Amino acid sequence: MYCNIYQLLRQPDEEWTDADLLSDHPLFLSSSNYVDDIKEEERDAAIKEFTKWLKKEELGNVDSGVIRFSPAASCERHFADRYARFHHLTLNLARVTEGIYLLCFDKVRDMVSDLMKVLVDENDDYVCLDVNQLIPMDEFLRTVDPKTPYYFGAVCKYHGGM
């Protein structure tokens, strides 16, 4: 599965990252993931799709190359539909007895893994800040400062092998 890494800059003239810089990130060192640069026309298409997605999900907008995130990006409908599943999974975890915890390792590990996937999808797009600081898109959206304007830098693609 291919996903994108969107470099978001706080200043329009900051240094752009590339696949070589990102390949040293633990995300790509610890698994069968790998990262590639993309051609300029692919970058333009990815930015266009990202811009449409932001608008559709009511997470923010892009105007004249400046990305502004909505103040409600972290708590609106993009995450709202996940709460029911999150709640269901936490209730199931709460029912785990000491015996189940001690004897059913695989089951408990799968439950915790499912819960983490609902909280932050680490197999989706990433945001790159500061040349090689990668943050899952979900985590970025939950912590983004809506007062900070961002600018597109590089866009790379990665293949997730997890």
Image (cartoon, rainbow, N blue to C red):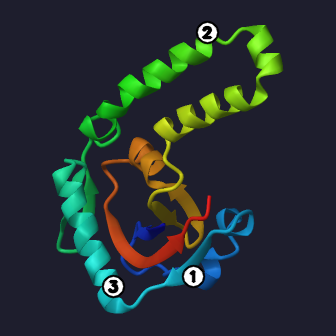
Closer to the eye: label 2 or 1: 2
Expressed as whole percent of the image width and height from the top left, the position of residue 145 reads 38, 47
Badge 1 is on which residue?
19
Q: What is the number of callouts on the image? A: 3
Q: What element carries label 3?
A: helix
Residue located at (41% from left, 66% from top)? 10
Q: Give the Cα separation between the discs numbered 2 and 1.
A: 44 Å
Closest to the observer, 121 or 7: 121
Tell which circle, 2 or 1, labels the residue nearer the N-terminal end.
1
Q: Name the residue under label 2.
A: 95
Q: In this view, does 101 lie above or below 52?
A: above
Q: Is residue 70 above or below residue 93?
A: below
Q: Is mark 1 on a helix, strand or loop?
A: helix
Q: Which residue is drawn at 50% across and 66% down?
A: 128
Residues at marks 3 and 2, CA–CA distance in whole angstroms: 48 Å
Percent position of residue 9, x then y: 42, 69
Q: Residues within 10 Å of mark 2 (few under 14, many from 20)?
A: few
Give 88 or 18, whichever is nearer the viewer: 88
35 to 97, vertically: above or below:
below
| Mark 2 element type | loop
Amino acid marked by disc 3: Glu
Residue 2 in the image, given as x and y percentages of width and height: 46, 70
Q: Name the residue under label 3.
A: 42
Which residue corresponds to the image point at 76% horizontal and 18% vertical from the top-left? 101
Amino acid type of disc 2? Answer: Arg
